Amino acid sequence: MASAMVKRNILLNPGPATTTNSVKMAQVVPDICPREKEFADIMRDLGKDLVEIAHGNVDDYTAVLFCGSGTLNIDVCVSSLVPENKKILILNNGSYSARAVEVASYYHINHIDLQLPTDRPIDLAVVQKALEENSDIAVVYCCMHETGTGILNPVKEIGALAHNVGAIMVSDTTSAYGLIPIDLKRDNLDFIMASAQKGLMSMTGLSFVIGKTKEIEKSAKYPTRSYYSNLYLQYSFIRDKGEMHFTPPVQTIYATKQAIKEYFEEGEKAKQRRHREVWETLWNGIHKLGFKTAYPKEYMSGLVVPVMYPKYSDGREFSFQKFHDGLYEKGFTIYPGKVEDVGMFRLCSLGAIYVEDAENFLKAAEEVLKKEDLMPDSF
Ligand SMILES: *Cc1c(COP(=O)(O)O)cnc(C)c1O
């Protein structure tokens, strides 16, 4: 097979992530109709591996695959899992949980938008109070790792509160899956979600919801609010025919098969340690350059460094664009913040990147800051 070297860019944006050359090349395969048995076999194994990565038992949990970006999973879970005359409680402490509120609004689903401070993890007492005041909550929803801020929410404890009142726990784990420990049962998670281009370090276009099979089966009787993104419809098609209902992202599935092989080769613990070390290097290095970060370290997932724009004593404005463009030219991609009215950019440690890459980034950052006269005063 062809094995050209492709230029390696260091993506410090919150996904898609830097991929290995072997994952890139795994997409180059003979043309195949995805209705062939050969392809169905790949899909079946893939589904099992995805459950295994979250330490789920394949007898109890199923991975339901979709063709689309990660937001499709939010659409699927919110539109498919709320029974008639029941509500979804959305714990909203960042832009990704706010997206779930938007989805619920679009489908006119009964929901509670529990607005919480975005600068800290979710407060369990507030969740408990909302559950006590509303007896009709069937689903509790939260984002595990709010990628916009880098804040990690206590999903396990929230899941326990949900289960106490007989509700199911759904979490957007898109930027946590394959990156920080998730154990479905231990963490009280009934439904999680992710897409191939984040923690798995594969390509875009494949997203998946992993959920309790019993709960998916139950949802067959829930109101249907969407056709293309109905969870039960897609689940039953995969269960009965071993295929996705409509055309799957064929090449991305080949890439993901390779990415999962590399995931298990690297090992869960070693991979988590690597992402953490890259993050620590970025966190410490950016402080050394005179920047301040936006939130206390103990709130952080260890995957996103939220960096405040520096303020200069002479009144100059920080130019994210100049900083970004200078770095982009050198092969590093940084990303703006996602918190309204706060001048912030983000450095993420998601992909196939190593401490050495983070060190090279910091050197490049210093060069660009000096060249563009953007060095923080405190440097
Ligand atoms: C990336 C991400 C998503 C999905 O975003 P898409 O742009 O649709 O891929 C959803 N939730 C979280 C927490 C994410 O980080």
Image (cartoon, rainbow, N blue to C red):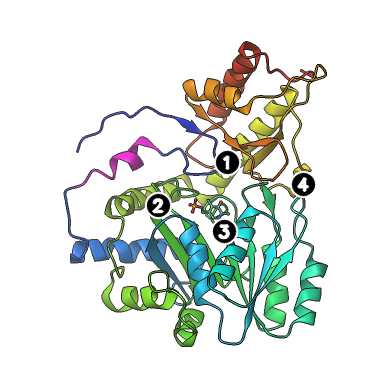
Give residue 170's position: percent from left, percent from top: 59, 69
On the question of residue 323 being in view, the answer is yes
Q: Quadrant of the N terminus?
A: top left
How far apart marks 2 and 3 lie (CA) works out to 17 Å
Report the amino acid beneath label 1: His
Q: CA distance from mark 2 to mark 4?
A: 30 Å
What label does residue 42 carry, if any?
none
Decide which of 29, 374 is in the foreground and name it.
374
The amino acid type of the residue labelled 4 equals: Glu
Residue at (22%, 61%) from the top-left corner? 34
Choose top left, top right, bottom left or bottom right for residue 83.
bottom right
Which mark lies nearer to you, 3 or 1?
3
Q: Which residue is mark 2?
A: 260
Give how far across and how far down residue 304 sits, in percent. Answer: 63, 42
Q: Which residue is mark 3?
A: 173
Q: Nearer the viewer, residue 199 or 48?
A: 199
Image quadrant in which the C terminus is located: top right
The residue carrying mark 3 has its beta carbon less than 8 Å from ligand 1: yes
> What residue is pinned by disc 4?
298
Residue 22 part of the magenta segment: yes
